[in-house]
Image (cartoon, rainbow, N blue to C red):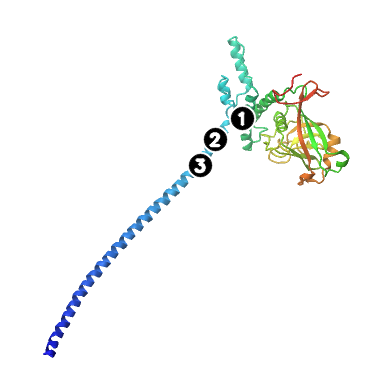
């Protein structure tokens, strides 16, 4: 019985095990298929998300590139607009709000001259039997007018036009010169009878060969050129003297002794030159192109070296601006002492320079402090003593 029961039970047992395995196998396959489907769904979702991200990134890059191009385009338009505005400044007079406040009519185009305006005003006054009105600006107003005209001239100069023969350039520079003459008189007083003068006070250093014999002090005097010829050049040097910050002789050449000027002064707005005031021996002129604020004393006749057409080939009329003459101290100070600075050319060692400690403006005047030839030291208005 034991054997039979075992024999009977064994095949059935095997069949049940096989059936169960089939069932289990079919169950496992279903579950595996379900897992695969789930994985596929996940991959599809991931791939879809990645596509969206790539799409968003691509759009972002397009927007970024578009904004960069737009910004550059706007910047270019703004620069063009700014340049056009600057050039348009030249087309009108510079009085602006200043003129409006004084009740004067709107400025005429630049091509019309002061003379034409004055004639029209006088004709209108004669017709109405009324005296003509005149605009007399004060010093501050004149200074603003000169600044505005100076800016206009610099814009024209930057174009590279030959200003000495260009009609519009000549008109604008003439306006600047006329306004500058008025400002010179308003600030420094009249110059017709007694030209402005500048006393140049020096400090010689121990490097100068005659230091032990003659000491550290020295002085020479410059008489300014007539403002009727070169007002812009004269005014520029007067302003350097009025706001002097320091400097000194730092270059020794065979034809000039050159001065370096501290203080950040602007160079000339244009190369102002008059054939009636050439670069003769003993004159002073501005160095460089554009000229200034560095200046030099001519120790020989530099009419050709620094006159029209010199130092460049583009403009046969362009020259250095000469603005004065050394009337005292040329022989005994300039030639006998300053010229003996140790070295040649530009002297890099500042201990060898001849320092300029002060530039003193001298103008026509009287009183106990006046010189024998009728000059007094200039002081700003409101600070001069009354006698």
- Give the image quarter of residue 161: top right
Number of the label disc, if any, that sits on residue 230 = none
Q: x, y (%) of residue 287? A: 73, 38
For disc 2, the marked residue is 84
The tag earlier along the polypeptide, 3 or 2, is 3
Sequence-first disc among 2 and 1: 2
- How far apart in space, not on screen, are marks 2 and 1 (Cα)? 17 Å
Q: What element carries label 1?
A: helix
Residue 302, quarter of picture: top right
Residue appearing at x 64%, y 22% in the figure: 138
For the C terminus, which image quadrant?
Answer: top right
x, y percent for residue 261: 72, 38
Residue sitting at the far top: 129
| Front-lying residue, 76 or 349 | 349
The residue beneath circle 3 is 75
**Mark 1 — residue?**
148
């Amino acid at each position: 019985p034991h054997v039979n029961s075992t024999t009977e039970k064994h095949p059935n047992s095997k069949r049940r095990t096989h059936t169960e395995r089939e069932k289990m196998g079919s169950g496992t396959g279903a579950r595996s298929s379900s897992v695969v489907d789930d994985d596929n769904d996940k991959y599809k979702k991931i791939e879809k998300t990645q596509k969206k991200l790539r799409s968003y990134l691509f759009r972002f890059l397009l927007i970024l590139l578009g904004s960069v191009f737009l910004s550059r385009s706007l910047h270019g338009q703004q620069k063009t607009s700014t340049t056009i505005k600057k050039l348009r400044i030249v087309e009108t007079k510079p009085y602006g709000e200043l003129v409006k406040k004084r009740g004067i009519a709107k400025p005429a185009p630049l091509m019309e001259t002061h003379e034409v305006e004055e004639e029209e005003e006088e004709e209108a006054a004669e017709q109405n039997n009324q005296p003509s009105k005149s605009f007399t600006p004060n010093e501050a107003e004149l200074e603003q007018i000169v600044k505005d005209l100076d800016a206009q001239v610099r814009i024209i100069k930057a174009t590279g036009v030959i200003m000495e023969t260009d009609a519009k350039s000549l008109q604008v520079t003439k306006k600047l010169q006329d306004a500058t003459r008025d400002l010179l008189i308003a600030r420094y007083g009249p110059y017709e009878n007694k030209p402005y003068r500048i006393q140049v006070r020096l400090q010689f250093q121990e490097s100068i060969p005659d230091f032990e014999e003659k000491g550290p002090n020295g002085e020479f005097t410059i008489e300014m050129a007539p403002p009727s010829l070169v007002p812009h050049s004269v005014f520029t040097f007067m302003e350097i003297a009025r706001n002097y910050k320091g400097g000194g002789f730092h270059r020794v050449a065979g034809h000039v002794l050159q001065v370096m000027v501290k203080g950040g002064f602007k160079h000339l707005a244009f190369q102002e030159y008059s054939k009636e005031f050439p670069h003769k021996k003993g004159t002073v002129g501005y160095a460089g192109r554009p000229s200034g604020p560095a200046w030099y004393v001519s120790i020989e006749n530099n009419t050709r070296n620094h006159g029209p057409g010199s130092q460049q080939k583009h403009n046969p009329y362009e020259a250095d601006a000469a603005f004065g003459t050394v009337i005292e101290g040329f022989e005994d100070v300039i030639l006998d002492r300053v010229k003996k600075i140790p070295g040649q050319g530009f002297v890099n060692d500042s201990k060898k320079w001849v320092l300029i400690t002060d530039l003193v403006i001298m103008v026509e005047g009287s009183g106990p402090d006046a010189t024998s030839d009728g000059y007094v030291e200039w002081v700003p208005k409101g600070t001069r003593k009354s006698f």
